[in-house]
Amino acid sequence: MIRRFRVLRQFLRRPLGVVSAVFLVIVIAAVALAKVVAPYNPLAQDYSAVLITPTGAHPLGTDQLGRDVLSRLLYGGQVTLVGILEAVVVALVVGIILGLLAGYLGGVLDTVLSRLTELVMAIPGIVLLLMTYALTNNNANAGMLVLGVLSVPTIFRVTRGAATVVRGEIFIDASRVVGVGKIAIMVRHVLPNVWGPIIVNASVLAAVTLGIQSGLNYLSLGVNPPAPSWGGMVSEAQSSLLQQPWIIVPSGLTIALVIVAFLLIADALRDATDSRSDTPTARPIRAAMDESRPVARPPKGVILAVDGLRVAFNGVRVVQDVHFAVSAGETVGIVGESGSGKTVTASAILDSLDDGAEVTGAVWFEGVELLRAPRSVRRATRGSGIAYISQDPMVALDPSFTVASQLGELVTRHHGLRGASRHKRVLELLSQVGLPDPAGTARRYAHQLSGGMAQRVSIACALAGNPRVLIADEPTTALDVTIQGEVLDLLRRLRDETGMAIVIITHDLGVIADLADRVVVMYAGEVVEQADAESLFALPAHPYTRALLAANPIASKRGKPLLAIAGTVPRPGTWPTGCHFADRCSFAVEACSSSAIPLAAVGKSAVHQSRCIRVDDVLSSKKKAVV
Amino acid sequence: MIKTLGLRLLASLVLLIVVPTVTFWLQAITPGNVAQQILGIGASKSAINTLNHQLGLDQPVWQRYLTWLGGFFHGDLGKSYITGDSVTGTLGGRLGVSLSLIIGALIVFTIVGVGLGILSSTGGRVFGRVIDIISTAGIAIPNFWLGVLLIGVFAVQLNVLPATGYVPPDQSASGWIASLVLPVIALSFAGITGVAKQTRDQMLVSLASPYARSLRANGASESSLLFRHALRNASGPIITVIGLIFVGALSGSVVVENIFVLPGLGSQAVQSTTQRDLPVIQGIAVYFTIIVVVVNVVIDIVNTILNPKARAS
Amino acid sequence: MNTKRYLIRIGAVIGVVATSIALAGCSSASSSPKAPTTLTIAAPNGPNSLDPALNGNGTPLIWYTQLAYEPLIKRAADGSAMPGLATSWKYSADRLSFIITLRKGVKFSDGTPLTAASVVAWLQYYKAHTSFQWMQNVSGIAASGALQVTLTLSTPDPLLPIAIDQEGEAGDIVSPDGLKDPAVLGKETHGAGPYVLDTSATIANSQYVYTANPNYWDKKDVHYKKVIIKVIADENSTLAALRSGQVDAAAISPKNVASAKSAGLQVTAAKAAMAGIYFFTLGDSSSPLANLKVRQALNMAVDRKGITKTLYLNNGVPTTQYVPEGMPGYVAGLEKKYPFDTAKAKKLLADAGYPNGFSFKMVVQPGASSQNLLSQAVIQNWAQIGVTVQLTAPTAFPDYVTALETGQYAATSLNFYYSAQLTDLQQLFTKPALYNAFNFDLPEANTLATEQRKYDITSAAGKKAAETSETYMVDNALAVPISSTDTVMASSKKITGVDFTSAFPIPDLTTFKPAN
């Protein structure tokens, strides 16, 4: 019930859909009430006013027998719209029933019905339609019935598809267990959940049916003069085209507008019923920069620095006040749980933020501020300055191209090599990342590689441009535990070999411990602590860090319950004033929540920072930080 | 892959038999004296009986069907009731015309549709909206209305293109193209929308995918991402949609051929239907089905080439 | 490179290339050799059949057989009967025989000679297979000499000279070779006319190509090497084709006359057909249409002037008669018979016993689109006096035939090409008659027909009998003639010979020739 109204509300938010719906309602009403609304009898002739352009008396002009076009359109709509209704209803009724049966019951029935549908889809429907009209002596209803049957496959597929998905859902199993009969399940549970795509397709079907039906009417099939029909009026107008060019407009335009209305309604319904409705956004577009805050150039030796980074979407901040720096050859780990903003930060560095991101702050790379740099500069840093490996290696490679092709493309891009020398370099890179059979791997596609191999290939792609900084986003999360270690070893080796800096993003403290020189801890969009790795593990200076370390399963004591941090991470948009961790923190006091907490140095350390006003207490406390 | 192709061909054969069977029986069960209709109002009883016998219409229905089926497997589709010509002879000459029209439309809506789809996936919001409007107009404007408008503007008013009629390519290559310009536009216009929408959606999916992200971050150029990677990965669904639209264009060709008086299968279909020339109608059903089957097979093959994962299965 | 610009550039290149090809195509199409060796005509539809026994009459059906089949008698534009394959013809004194003398030295297109035997064979075939009534009174066909054929008649029939002219088609002699396997006559021609159908270049219902017949008996009368008839159903496309020079001549609709003239085309017109409504149920006592007053009321309720002006513009004349002015049988006074008077019509209807009107079903003959419009206009007129008509308009002839078989329809639209008054009488109102589907029996009609048959059409007695018949038909409101409509031909100034008059209103393509 509530869901239905949600759809309605969503629909009403889309202006085009609303306008179209209103337009359709007006048309349908006018046509249905033609007897009342039409100014003339559609058959009334006036030889003194033949083929005239619109006047007050005849708002859409007259045809070759002096009949009022507007009146004929209104009456003609009855035949037209009733026909559409017939075809759509037949398609819906048969399609939904068969689709539910096939999608929910599955098995042989599904196979048989699906094959049948394919068969129907492959029949040249127009031949059947022509024959139907010929054999039934131009009976409009018969034609629309056949058209409805020919349209069943679309509805069937949509219903079946949605029903198959719903079939697998837990609440259906639950109903079955409880003993609800199959038909009852289908009607009461499956149907309400599949009607979304169905109504979208029904609207599209109405549009398509109108197009086909008016075409048939144009060929004089399914119409009986002198009764008007929209398609028939186009045909009549055609013969008077030379005498009165205007006459061709009203009939054709009416058909086109009604079709458009159905399509726009379908679009709006699609948006309204699909919660994941965002069509993938266009490629990233830079949002306006905030020029107000002056940014200082980082010192030499710092290869990458993020200064005062703030990113928001639709006014909602997802990260704020992020500072950290990476020196040449250094490995910095960014650690935090999901929702902490670490990926957004990485995206900001990589210039791959989603469309509509509002970014302020600065990202320095080798002395150049990237956020304000021209596109060519940013493009130039990609791969050769800053490179990237992502979490899931299987989808990080283009499934349509071989390893050699993708890697080779990057090699060409960065070094201009082609042909044999390019291939040589490709094999070099592949062996550099520890692949035992570079030539064999080069020939393969992504789906033919194991997870570990794929990740190595990804790393090779990142190395193709000899980058100075490698951003590794959860590089081991998707891999087997045994492979994880290998990949980390590889990264360490590469770092030592090439001297590149690594920014490793992870939620796994073990990875940090293994690889990082320095660590940046993020929580709810902010950097809460920064320190070199040793200090962080030994002397966490922020309650959250303390809690993280304590909650690490490795650190847990056998026999004792696993420690977890009570509460949940505040989502963007629901951040409290003051410390974001306050409501879960055992050190929290009133001052923590009253105003924003700055990131401050811990003691006299230049590198250790913490966003906590009770640092001293934290450092000295032996108390467990968890509740 | 061989297996799927084999299955596909088997299904096609079934289709090739089912479709004409359906059309045969539809006609068979309807009352109406074919010979009477051919000969006209004042025909004598004896003339009607002679013609009925000549056409084999006095045999029981089952027998007629089996005779037809037998001939079908030998490649003989019977003779036209009206002209006495073999069906294959009548339709053979027309096949080329229809193919010129439909394949011309295929080329146009593929190139323009994919082009528009790519443009709207890379352009800004405004551009995307403009493309949306053009696409919607494409599918909303009825093809017969568009055809009439095109004739009115280009042939009658401006007189730059022939209004109707078909010039065979062996007679004049440029005349052939000129006679196809307006019909192809009328037929392809609606298809452009479907292709553009699908292209845009698939391109956007590809461009937002993890591999695109990785490649871009590691330095791949925008044009490579667009034309090499995104397009390649999007091509599967795009080609599938193109196939669907192509089959739809078969239906559209019937109306378009009528408007522009192109002597193809479509205009023959309308004519033969009104003349109750059963053998020709069935022949057209067979030809249309063959076209659909061939297109589907080609799509399967192209998809397999483009999608390495499909090759393995 | 910027992707957008790249794509737009490609698009522009493709556009330019395509446009230039198309423009090259059309410019070459319009300047392609319309040299005086080829005549191109546009027709709105193809033939019913190329077999003269199965085709039909009127423009344009007749063009397809006319080009390849020389008739026994050729009628000139002024209506006079000229020798064709026959050099002379006459009726016997008792008018029960018709003797035809054939031309010497004529060969068919396949090279075989024209003999009396071949004419007899053809006429026998024609009689056995046609559904037209031209030979209905012929009881015997025999060769009475090497080049003479005698037809024996069961009753006098003055229409034979019309039957065997290029419009009647009964005299379109088909060679014995063609008759061996008559099935081929549907797609090949085997005649003795100036042209032969080129089957390889012909596409049924799209274009018909004829090449000069090398065996034609009057070589100097063949004006072109090739004649092409293009089928263009749409009136506007026809006009466009005329204007662009794609086509040299075509029949056009009255509403396109002004455009044709302003495009520099010659326009020729002559009264060619009667458009009106015909009733089937004249003999059915339960049908109101069997009542004289009812029919008179229906005649009075029609606004002939308004309808004619609207549908036929300057190429139609309102009429109550079955033949046009100038043709024997026309009686000027009859035009005053049914003035447009809705009130009077209503009163007549009430007098007849139908004060609240009545309803019936009507079926439109497929073919000319104007018949559809005409029917719609008429039934609107009749609605004003309370007569409701349900109209059915089948799209093709077989459906029309089926419709008639059902016996549901009381009336049909009529587009009757002029030939002679007797043709109207005996195709419409006698028993039997071509259109008399329900077999009504009007004794007076039968008597008048028998009387008319005794005389030559153009003789004084014949004329008088025709006028008597016409008066009978109009006075008894047997049908509702509405307009006398023109055939209108538009032709390029490059050709002449496009002559026809209401005496013989069928343009004869074989007389068209280059203008110089």
Image (cartoon, helix red, strand yellow):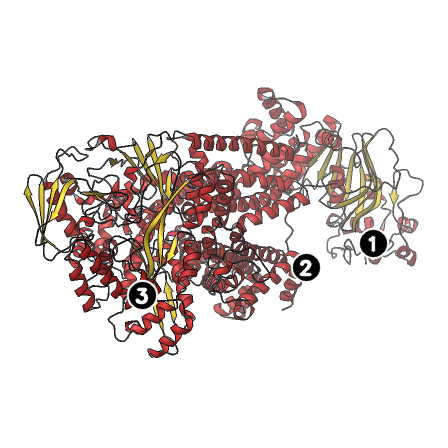
User: Which residue lies under the disc numbered 2?
Assistant: A13
User: Which residue lies under the disc numbered 3?
Assistant: C411
Chain to which mark 3 belongs: C
Dot 1 falls on a residue whose secondary structure is loop
Dot 2 falls on a residue whose secondary structure is loop
For marks 3 and 1, give the CA distance. Answer: 93 Å
Image vertical order of residue A402 relative to residue C431, above or below: above
The kind of residue on which mark 2 rests is Arg
Report the number of numbered marks.
Answer: 3
User: Which residue lies under the disc numbered 1?
Assistant: A581
Disc 3 to disc 2: CB gap under 8 Å: no
| Residue A287 visible, this angle | yes
Question: Which quadrant would residue C463 be assigned to in this image?
Answer: bottom left
Image vertical order of residue A575 relative to residue A530, above or below: below
Identify which residue, A597 or B238, lies in the foreground. Answer: B238
Instruction: Look at 20% across and 33% down and name the residue there.
Output: C216
Chain to which mark 1 belongs: A
> Residue A333 at what x, y percent from top left?
77, 39
- 10 Å crowding of disc 2: few (<14), some (14-19), many (20+): few
Disc 3 to disc 1: CB gap under 8 Å: no
> Residue C415 at what x, y percent from top left?
32, 56
The kind of residue on which mark 3 rests is Ala
Q: Quadrant of the N terminus of chain B?
A: top left
Instruction: Tell me the mark number nearer the camera, choosing from 3 and 1.
Output: 3
> Residue C515 at what x, y percent from top left?
35, 32
Q: Left or right: C125 with respect to C43?
A: left
